[in-house]
Amino acid sequence: MLTGLLNNRHSAVFFALALCVGCQSGSGDTASETDSGSDSDTDGNGELVVPDVYAFTSRFGDESSVSYSGQTARQVLVSQLKGEMAAIQDEIEMGAVFESGDVAARLNFYYQFDSASAGSLPHGLSTTPPPLQTTWDDISSGKDLQGKIAGNDETGQHKDWNSQMVGWDSAANPDGLIQDWFAAVDALAVEYSAGNIPLDPTGAQISKYYISPEGHDYTQLIQKFLLGAVNYSQGTDDYLDDDLEGKGLNADNTEASDGSPYTALEHQWDEGFGYWGGARNYLEYTDDEIATSDGRPEYASGYHDYDGDGAIDLKAELNFAASVNAGKRDRGSSDAAPTDFSTTTMQAFLTGRAIISSADGALTDEQMTALKEQRDIAVDGWERAIAATAVHYVNDTIRDMNAAEYNFADHAKHWGELKGFLLTLQFNPRSQVSDADLAMLHSLVGTAPVLPGSGGEADYIADLLAARDILGQSYGFDASNLGDENGENGW
């Protein structure tokens, strides 16, 4: 078993974990950081050497063995789909009028992305310095979201998502829910752009077309659900799982995969890491920098030109989605009970990949046990950050409901984020929340926020506090991170 994981994000050195590698032989090289990858192997004493950067050299040549371009492409697709919804709002404010089906088609451009017709187009994600990759095909080709959403990619799924999805009963499955939401936001855009702007509970016009009068912020619901039903599902229930022969952690590690510079097992682990979304040098970032809240100028936007080539490599140098939320929750945790989801998760990914690379062939039983241990640590850290983020949005929603100056857009946004993260939890086969508790969470939170003037505000706040308690008990969160009855003094 691996022990002694460090908790120092700022460590600039490599650390060793005492793991006997049995009869497997290694090069004896120490890890060294290069643009193409780092050797990560056993030292002369048979101890595993783990780099602090996700960089590993191929044992079939001198190039990097790390590859997860498809996962990066899907991270960008989710990000840009959300950006498209904001762009449509800008167009409406400039006087654009939309016909039925227009907005749904624009959202499906990303969800059903077709490289053959659109791969040469700019992806539109901007950084400073600019991205190394300028078109979709520069990132990866042949990738979409629909084909990988839970239920559509059926291999290895731990549930039948056509009958066992929880949290939104009106949809048959995850794909159906996304299409239902696209249709809903399409209808809202048609009305809004025609000047038929609905009113919020205060009698004011709703400020964004993608917020329904019922309080559904579809931008938040769609983005968070895709990060769960695609990224989290694929990462935890596919690439990092061990339930199928020749798949996930059971993939081959003895030969190059189809002539690539990596084995199938190395690639499966990399793809799981890609869905989590951390930059290769993630451990060099502070929590403020991961959260894009403060820090060194060259890191403070959540990306860093690590190799100094004057561009941001989207496949290596930018923090996406789940990895960002981990830093946000660590940053917001109590001084009395600080969390370190970010470092713990990243170090588990690094250590697991080092175990695979050090094997130089099929893993021994001891190495496989150690690898599964690191998988469990990585997936648990990933999930805890999601659950803690749900706690955060419980608190935000309660504060929105108690605010002296009520803001409907804030209320809808925070509730949408809460619901989206709760929907995510079902896609991990190793979830720490039971099926019964997850069903109760969705029963308490419901499928729409309770709005002012409904008469049920006090009861709903009590339900939100009960949901927060379930999350706290399921994950062992300290009370100082959960917050008080007013949603204050917690995440």
Image (cartoon, rainbow, N blue to C red):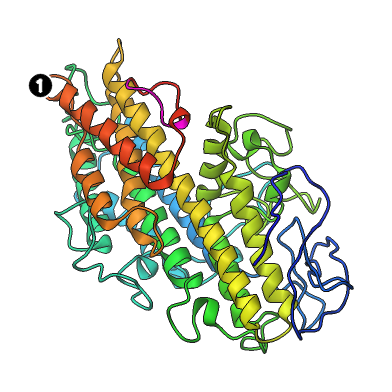
Q: Position of residue 147 (x, y in %)?
A: 37, 70
Task: Name which residue type carries label 1.
Answer: Gly
Q: Where on the picture, by quarter, is residue 43?
A: bottom right
279 relative position to 385: left or right:
right
Task: Tell me, yes or no, if residue 121 can be seen here.
Answer: no
Is 13 above or below relative to 297? below
Read off the residue under disc 1.
455
Q: Secondary structure at mark 1?
A: loop
> Residue 50 in the image: x percent, y percent?
76, 62
Report the number of numbered marks.
Answer: 1
To which quarter of the image does residue 61 belong? bottom right
Between residue 337 and residue 111, name the one nearer to us.
337
Along the horizontal axis of the image, is 306 left or right of 410?
right
Relative to residue 220, is residue 235 drawn left or right? right
Q: Is residue 430 left or right of residue 140?
A: left
Residue at 54%, 76% in the rendered image? 249
Q: Which residues are magenta?
A: 481-485
Could you tell me if residue 267 is visible in this image?
A: yes
Which image quarter: residue 117? bottom left
Which residue reaches farthest top?
404
Q: Where in the figure is residue 143, as x and y percent of width and height?
A: 47, 69
Residue found 41% across the figure and 33% down from its top: 392
Secondary structure mostly seen in magenta is: loop
* Residue closest to the far left: 455
Q: In the rendering, at what x and y percent does residue 100 appear?
A: 19, 50
Quadrant housing the N terminus: bottom right
Q: What is the crowding at mark 1: few (fewer than 14 residues within 10 Å), some, or many (at least 20)?
A: few
Kindly identify the residue that appears in the image at 50 percent across and 86 percent down.
246
